[in-house]
Image: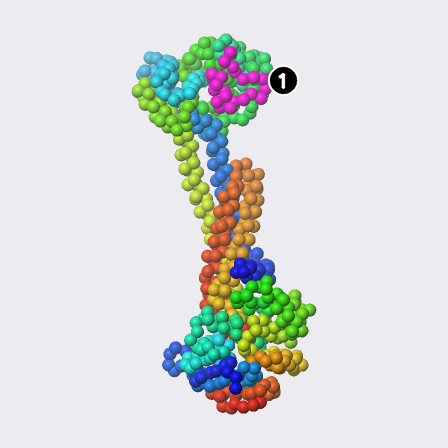
Amino acid sequence: MKAPIISLQGVHKYYGDCEPRLHVLKGIDLDVAEGEYVSITGTSGSGKSTLLNLLGCLDNTSNGAYLLNGRDVSLYSDDELSKIRNEDIGFIFQSFNLIPQLTVFENVQVPLLYGARSIAATTDLCHEVIDSVGLSDRSEHRPTQLSGGECQRVAIARALINDPVLLLADEPTGNLDSTTGEEVLALIDDLHQQGRSVVMITHDPEVANRSQRRVDLRDGIIVEEGAA
Amino acid sequence: MISQKHLELVRMGLRSLVGYPMRTVLTMLGVVFGVGSVIAMLALGAGAERELLKEIGRLGIQNIIINSIKPEVQDTSNQRSNWISSYGITFKDHRQIVDTIPGIEKALPVHVSKKTVWQGSKRVEGTLYAVTPEHLDMFQLNTSVGRNLTHLDDEKLSRVCVVRSGMLKELGIYQDPIGFGLNIDKETFYIVGVLKDDSFLGYARKALSVDAKSSEIYVPYSSALRRHGTRSITRRSGSSEATDVELNQVVISVTDLDQVLVTARMLGSLLERNHPEKDYELVVPLEVLSQRQKTQQVFNIALVAIASISLLVGGIGIANIMLATVTERTKEIGVRRALGARRRHIIAQFLTETTTISTIGGGVGVLVGIGLVQVLTFFTGWSAAITLSSVALSLSISMAVGIVSGIYPARRAAGLDPISALRHE
């Protein structure tokens, strides 16, 4: 078996400083192998958003280790986590989260602004990535001029620009109708086929069924884990 | 490489400013008017200073002027017995100054007397200035018509004079004035030249005891003294007053500029010895100039301080709008943070935006200031000078205002928790 890209070991997450603290994640153990496509399901309040924040390095664990690509990031500083988010994680959000005043091309460029590579050297790369999601004729448009499905494809292009080790999708079809949702899911399937590791959070069982493995979360613990 | 990335950040910062043009313009407005008023104030200050230089500089900063003045305390009993009041600088003083004070290039005597001037049946009150030819050169009294007084006029005791053009009008001389004879105290002086009409201004006029009516008549020193003497009688509504002033004025030119103040002190002690009663004044343009410049500087600082208040208000305006923007753009900040922006990137982004606003505002403010100065000078006739240094100063201040006013909003933005910022709607 390949070395896991994600390894959560006894992860706890509390919120609040004073007792009784809100205990959201109660000992999560989870491994995701390289190239694997995992979906995390659960009702609201099950802790899946918290888990997503931890996996996306937006937050630190309260207890336990989080190994991303072999590095324990649970004790990383804010700047170090920013670097990890920039280089190793590609976010796909439910509400796309494109920056409205920037063009498609510039939105895809945003992660590059915070990385080490020069902007000039990556112009071709941006065009390539935009092309790969089928939006090359839209690269000078604003997000408000695009449909929801197109916006999500721009977001996926943005997530891919730094060639991350992990794609992290949070209800990627939640704001889309079924047809465009299907297109976006097909695109994610393609990316998985190309060997990308994908973790997707969803409440929709049908969407979850497309993944290789389902992890069901309830009240902060994994209650069910198995092939979809 | 870093600079190129920074340019990209600036470009994206500009994008969000262009995205909300109305808000950007309104945010800028405070700085625009702040800088505009600073520019205008500095320009007016510089103009006043230039005017001052022109005014006092015309006296010649290498010169020292001694004026005879009527002593303030008059002994009435003495006046009754001796009806001629006699005071002021004497020929003896003049001789002593020339003989004993070192470093003097020239010491030009001037005798001034009020005279009634007749031309045909026209009558004008004039002031007769008996001066040496150098006097006219020293104060740049150039003729526009005819010639100036010469040494030959002085030697030959010629009855010639140089007048102001204003006097010609009063006398009703509208044709070529050269050769016209003016009757002054039973003597006829013939006009040989008319002075250019740039009279002395403000302080210079006072220091040279020239009145505002520009009714000066310049005659050769020796001619006037030989013909009229030093006594002068002024009739005023029945009573008459006679004065005997040997010299009304001595203009001293010092060879070395560094020695002006020393020479002035020596002159002061010489005159103090000769005149127990203080019936003279010592005018040192150099001293007056530096005093006036100091006053002007204080005034300038006060003006700019007042103008800076509007700049401060402009800065507060930017900070205020930027704070509102931070709230409005919380989501964007969260997205950027999720995509790998560090805190300092967010700070840099907001500082870039505020600095861009304030610098462009400063640039526009400079133009507004220049316009304001044009309008002010047009309507008030004040003198103004826009200096390069004032433009550079205002631009750098406005840049600094942008940075300072951006710090708090930028830190607020950078301090947002990325998770809650992302969830913000």
Location of residue A143 in the rendering, given as x and y in whole percent from the top left corner = 63, 69
Q: Residue at the far front: name it.
A: A1
Does residue B347 appear anywhere in the picture? yes
Residue sitting at x 59%, y 62%: A120
Q: Would residue A206 be found to the left or right of residue B262 on screen? A: right
Q: Which quadrant of the figure has residue A192? A: bottom right
Q: Residue at the far right: name it.
A: A137
Q: Would residue B425 be found to the left or right of residue A144 on screen? A: left
Location of residue B184 in the rendering, given as x and y in whole percent from the top left corner = 51, 12
Q: Is residue A193 above or below residue B86?
A: below
Does residue B17 appear anywhere in the picture? no
**Amino acid marked by disc 1:** Gln
Q: Is residue A201 above or below residue B275?
A: below
Write down the residue under mark 1: B175
Q: Is residue B129 magenta?
A: yes
Parent chain of label 1 = B
Q: Which residues are magenta?
A: B126-152
Task: Locate the C terminus of chain A and report the quarter of the image it occupies.
Answer: bottom right
Q: Is disc 1 placed on a helix, strand or loop?
A: loop
Q: Is residue B72 magenta?
A: no
Q: Nearer the viewer, residue B388 or A31?
A: A31
Dot 1 alpha-carbon crowd within 10 angstroms: few under 14, some 14 to 19, many 20 or more: few
Residue sitting at x 57%, y 73%: A163
Residue sitting at x 50%, y 46%: B392
Residue sitting at x 47%, y 87%: A221
Circle count: 1
Q: Nearer the viewer, residue B370 or B164?
A: B370
Location of residue A171 in the rendering, given as x and y in whole percent from the top left corner = 57, 80
